[in-house]
Image (cartoon, rainbow, N blue to C red):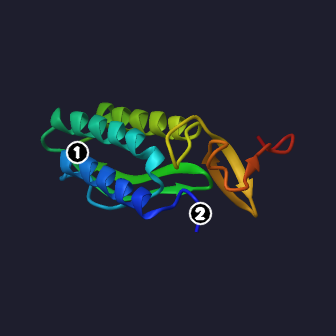
Amino acid sequence: MLEWDTEEYRAGRRAAYEAIRYRHPDIVTVGFDCNAGWFPILGRFFDEVAEVIATAPQATFDLWQVKEKMGGLSIYCVLDSHRRDDDLRRRINGAYEAARREANVTCDVCGEPGVLRVTEGCFMTRCEQHADGGVPYQPKKGNE
């Protein structure tokens, strides 16, 4: 077990998830497969989604998955507005890109500034305190 992965941390993670789900029960319909450091980012993302959907009552938002993947935040969702509404999609895509970019520089454990790290082939975005042996990842020239 990792030093930071305590029952207290997991209880705080559950409480933070439930707070976001409580604010947005109609759109937060699945659990989050990431650490709690990104939950404030996710809270802001879902606040924006709720605001967008409120402007278009015919729109539906289906959340499929929220997870960490290769050290980054991935949110899989579908917006169905029953009409071609590029503005709604543009706003939700913008909110997603903002969340993704913020997560790329935020420790997924604690929410402090972090960098992409790698350990034993696993990528994570972490601060120094929660690096868990990971070292900053520097892509090879030409692979950025």
Secondary structure of the residue carrying tag 2 is loop
Q: Give the percent coordinates (x, y) of residue 100.
A: 50, 40
Mark 2: which amino acid? Leu
- Dot 2 or dot 1: first in sequence order is 2
Q: Which residue is at the far bottom?
A: 1
Which of 22 and 28 lies nearest the eye of the viewer?
22
Residue 32 lies left or right of residue 87; in this view the side is: right
Looking at the image, is 39 positioned above or below residue 94? below
Residue in view at x 53 percent, y 48 percent: 108
Q: Locate the N terminus by quadrant.
A: bottom right
Residue 33 lies left or right of residue 88; in this view the side is: right
Residue at mark 2 to residue at mark 1: CA–CA distance: 44 Å
Which of 15 and 3 lies nearest the eye of the viewer?
3
Q: Give the percent coordinates (x, y) of residue 64.
A: 36, 60
Q: Residues within 10 Å of mark 2 (few under 14, many from 20)?
A: few
Residue occupied by mark 2: 2
Q: Is residue 82 visible?
A: no
Q: Give the percent coordinates (x, y) of residue 12.
A: 36, 54
Q: Is residue 9 visible?
A: yes
Residue in view at x 61 percent, y 51 percent: 71
Residue occupied by mark 1: 81
Asked which quadrant contains residue 50, the reply is top left
For discs 2 and 1, the disc positioned in front in the rendered view: 2
Residue in view at x 50 percent, y 44 percent: 110
Q: Locate the C terminus by quadrant.
A: top right
Mark 1: which amino acid? Ser
Q: What count of labels does the image hold?
A: 2
Residue 21 lies left or right of residue 91; in this view the side is: left
Asked which quadrant contains residue 70, the reply is bottom right
Q: Give the percent coordinates (x, y) of residue 48.
A: 30, 34
